[in-house]
Amino acid sequence: MEEMTSILRSCWLFQGLTDTELKQVLHCIPSRRQSYRKGEILFHTGDSFSQAGIVLQGGLHIFREDFWGNQMILSDCGPGDVFGEVFACLPDSTTDVSVRAVSDSQVVYLDVPHLLTVCPNACPFHSRLIRNFITVLAQKNRTLSRKIHHLTQRGIRGKLLSYLSEQSALLGKTTFSIPYNRQQLADYLSVDRSALSAELGRLQQEGILSFHKNVFTLTQRD
């Protein structure tokens, strides 16, 4: 329980809550904890979803898949990240994405209708939870806006440099790791993997960047 509380404390949904209030949330709002194996699907496109998930351990990819099985990774989630909250706010609709565990993972699910409704006990932390929930939705909107910016760049080079430049800025480092392997990065940028690898090779030859697996170093050019 203490380990789960430590992870939840880093989640934006619980910002400003004391440890006592955080524990009260888990008793006040219906919740369940579930484990997944690497590669296991948490939910598929077309499923109904009334809970928000919070990653406690491992990592997830949120993706779309077309009729022929081609996938596009929309985002990744690590410990403390929230997912599924948008669909949980739309009880009469079904999901248009799928979620897969990319490593052995643990997730805690919270019932969103209860989260957004002040309970009969009038717990003082409910109003803060609702404000925090809106913040989470705003952050997801910003993340999707950033991805749209990457995808609207011209050519594979433009998409790559846009994404890598953003990661460097977010982390405040010129050397950093990304949460994707080559195929996953190609799926995220919606490009062909072989063409992506070829462009990375050209960028390295030109001295714009260097890389080893999923670790990249961006180079300032005169």
Image (cartoon, helix red, strand yellow):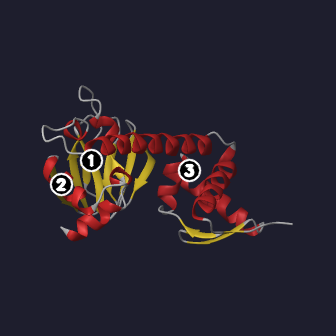
**Which amino acid lies under the numbered mark 1 shown in the image of this protein?**
Phe
Report x, y in % for residue 70. Answer: 43, 44
Residue at 13%, 53% in the rendered image: 27
Instruction: Kindly indicate whether the residue at mark 3 contacts the one at mark 1 (C-beta within 8 angstroms).
Output: no
Residue 9 to residue 43: above or below: below
Disc 3 marks which residue? Answer: 192
The N terminus - image quarter: bottom left
**Of the pair 191 and 147, the residue shown nearer to us:** 147
Left or right side of 155 for 83: left
Left or right side of 42 for 75: right
The residue mark sitting in front, 1 or 3, is 1
The mark that comes first in sequence, 3 or 2, is 2
> In the structure shown, which secondary structural element does the residue marked by tag 3 occupy?
loop
**Which amino acid lies under the numbered mark 2 shown in the image of this protein?**
Gln
> In the structure shown, which secondary structural element does the residue marked by tag 1 occupy?
loop
Q: From mark 3 to mark 2, how far is it between C-alphas?
A: 48 Å
Left or right side of 60 for 156: right
Instruction: Kindly indicate whether the residue at mark 1 contacts the one at mark 2 (C-beta within 8 angstroms).
Output: yes
Number of callouts in the render? 3
Q: Quadrant of residue 39?
A: bottom left
Residue at 20%, 45% in the rendered image: 123
Circle 2: is it few (<14), some (14-19), or many (20+) Cα within 10 Å?
few
Residue 61 to residue 105: above or below: above
Q: Is residue 188 visible?
A: yes
Disc 1 marks which residue? Answer: 125
Circle 3: is it few (<14), some (14-19), or many (20+) Cα within 10 Å?
few
